[in-house]
Every structure is written in structure tokens, then in C-alpha cells.
Image: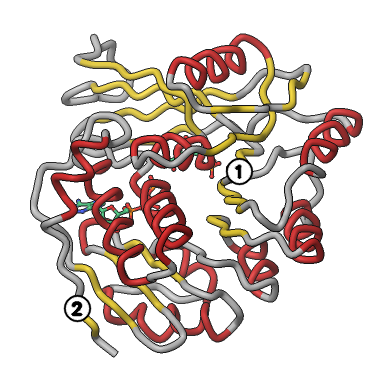
Amino acid sequence: MIYTITLNPTIDYIVTVPQLALGHSHHMQDELITPGGKGIMVSRVLKALGIPSIALGFRGGFTGDFVRDYMEELNILNQFTVIKERTRINLVLKSDQDTEISDYGPSATDEEVARFMKGFEDISTQDFVVMSGSKLPSMPKDFYEQLIRSLHEEGVPFACDITKDELRNSLQYHPLVVKPNQKEVGEFFGRTFTTWQEVVPYGKQLVELGAQHAIVSLGGDGALLFTPNEVIYAPPLSGKVANPVGAGDSMVAGFVGTFIRTGDASEAFRVAVAAGTATAFSPDIATTEEIEAQLGRVVLEIIE
Ligand SMILES: Nc1ncnc2c1ncn2[C@@H]1O[C@H](COP(=O)(O)OP(=O)(O)OP(=O)(O)O)[C@@H](O)[C@H]1O
Ligand SMILES: O=P(O)(O)OC[C@@]1(O)O[C@H](CO)[C@@H](O)[C@@H]1O
């Protein structure tokens, strides 16, 4: 079974306001209220790919109830640890330029974290764990590393979509795949990139530092896959971006779900690109049909 971990879930409140002007009142043109947080997005895309998963993490308050209810409606298994404080709401304002306002999220008590860790004990070497997104602000800096170290000691395979020091500390435990975007790779190595080609030597370093595979998503410039032997570039597919929230998570789901089934990194990358693109072009997370429609269009270029 694939377990996704979303320590800090969200309700994503995505509103479209054409010609937004600060300091003025507006009527929204459109809204989308959807459960989010990166691991939850991964579970939702795995579902679209026909792959079951169990979503773990923390939820609290009426917003946490919404996340649970929506996941049940989608028939996605979930075993969230219930906490006293309220799950956050993240606001995305879609206008000429998109603006995101993210909440830091609730705190969890030691007792609540201990309950979460107990659920973790059932995970075995036959399972796979995907860890994505921010942790709760009350958690120690090395919370992810503690989780990853214990999985590694138990021999449980995992992938992670985390950033900065948390990404750095994860690499020594050989995640199946890490998926920073171009900006996050820049932050990681203290660089600013003006072209995607400049990212290539740094993506290679993620594998040299221990990742089994690294995907670097490049937004409208496509994506790169780094393996110990190859660098593969997927140019962007043409289409109209509707809502890119979750496009990166869709790549993680596509890669992990396909690699577990086939052991073929290049095929897994193809599905990752199709799923990421399909989500970027869809108002919500991509559907099965939307992913299938992109699959045949993906082009992979071995560049090294
Ligand atoms: N404008 C676009 N045109 C074509 N493809 C796109 C576009 N934006 C995103 N994609 C596809 O989706 C993938 C993931 O997008 P992106 O790099 O924005 O992920 P991300 O920054 O991790 O996003 P998020 O954190 O919202 O999930 C890209 O690598 C690309 O394949
Ligand atoms: O604050 P985090 O945990 O890093 O990211 C949270 C988030 O931006 O990630 C998802 C898109 O990838 C959204 O559902 C959610 O709002």
C-alpha cells in the first residue's frame, strides 16, 4: 500500500477575480474549495491513476472535517490523526497574476504527535511512503528526518517532496525520488537560474548526494529527470493553464505510482509529466481522462 503523509493539510480556497485592484471591492468570477496539502494531492492523483493509497496526517476543527468528508466522497482511504486546533485554509487569488496567501497551520500537542507516530508503526517493507509539504509549526526542525530515519531503519521505501534543509537531510536515506521545482533547486544550492539548462548540473548533484531519482519541475519550461545514468528533458506540452496548484504533486504521484508497478524510471517520468501537465491545464486536480489525453503527447529527450 502507498501511504501519503500530509502533516499540514489545507482547504485550498481558489478564487478568480479578473482585474484585481488592491484596496477595491470585487465580486469573484469563480471559486473552488478543495482539500489540499501536497500528500493529499498525491493521493487524489493516485486515485485518478487507479492506484489505492491511504492518506495520513493531522486534521482538526471544521476545516479538518471538510478534508475528511471530501476524501471519503472521493473514496480515498484516510487515517488522519485528529487534533484540537483547526486545519488551515490557504487562499489562491487568480487574476492577471496569481497570488497565494498561505497559513502556517495549527500546532499539535506531544500527545497528538505520539498518536500519529503510533499509526506509523503499522507500515512495513511491503509498503511505500510519500511525504510532502510543510510540517506543523509546532514540530521540531528535524521532524521529517526523524520520520525518514525510522523508515530507513525499518527498510520501508519512500519518496519526498520537501525543501531546503529537510530535503538535504533526506538524501542520505536514498529516497526513490525527490521533486523540487527550479526555484527550490536554486534555494537549495544558493543559485538563481535564468534558463532551465543551468539547472542540469545541480539536478545531477541531487542524485550524487543520494536520491535514486530526482525530478526538477520547470513550470512552463517542462521538466527534467535525473537518474544515476541519464538526464532526460520533457519539453512543455502546449495548452492553456487553468490552475497549476497541485501540478508538482501530480508528478510525484505519476512517478511513484508507475515506478512501483513497472520499475521503469523513464516510463514513470512520462506518466509524471502527463499528470503534471493535465493538472496544470485542469481547473482542479486532473481526472483519469485528462491524464490519458496528455500521455500520448509527452516527448522525452535524453540530453546526457
Ligand atoms: N504553463 C505550463 N505549461 C505546460 N506545462 C506546465 C505548465 N505549468 C506546469 N506544467 C507541467 O506541470 C509540471 C509541474 O509544474 P510546476 O513546476 O509548476 O510544479 P510545482 O512548482 O511543484 O507546483 P505545485 O507546488 O503547485 O504543485 C511541470 O514540470 C510541467 O510538466
Ligand atoms: O505549505 P505547503 O505544505 O508547502 O504547501 C501547501 C500547498 O500549497 O501545496 C499544495 C499544492 O502543491 C496545495 O494544496 C497547498 O495549498
> Which residue occupies the extreme right position in the image?
111
Question: For mark 1, what is the residue?
Answer: 3
Q: Residue at x 23, y 44 (%)?
A: 291
Identify the mark at residue 301; answer none if there is no mark.
2
Badge 2 crowding class, 10 Å Cα cut-off, few under 14, some 14 to 19, many 20 or more, is few
Tag 2, which secondary structure? strand
Q: Which residue is drawn at 78% across and 17% down?
A: 84
**The quadrant where residue 194 appears:** bottom left
Identify the mark at residue 127; answer none if there is no mark.
none
Q: Is residue 106 above or below residue 114?
A: above
Q: Which of marks 2 and 1 is in front?
A: 1
Badge 1 crowding class, 10 Å Cα cut-off, few under 14, some 14 to 19, many 20 or more, is many
- Closer-to-camera residue (204/212): 212
Amino acid type, callout 2 = Glu
* Left or right: where 26 falls relative to 174: left
Q: Does the residue labelled 1 lie within 8 Å of ligand 2?
A: no
Marks 2 and 1, the one that precedes in the sequence: 1
Q: Residue at x 60, y 27 (%)?
A: 78
Task: State if disc 1 and disc 2 touch (CB < 8 Å).
Answer: no
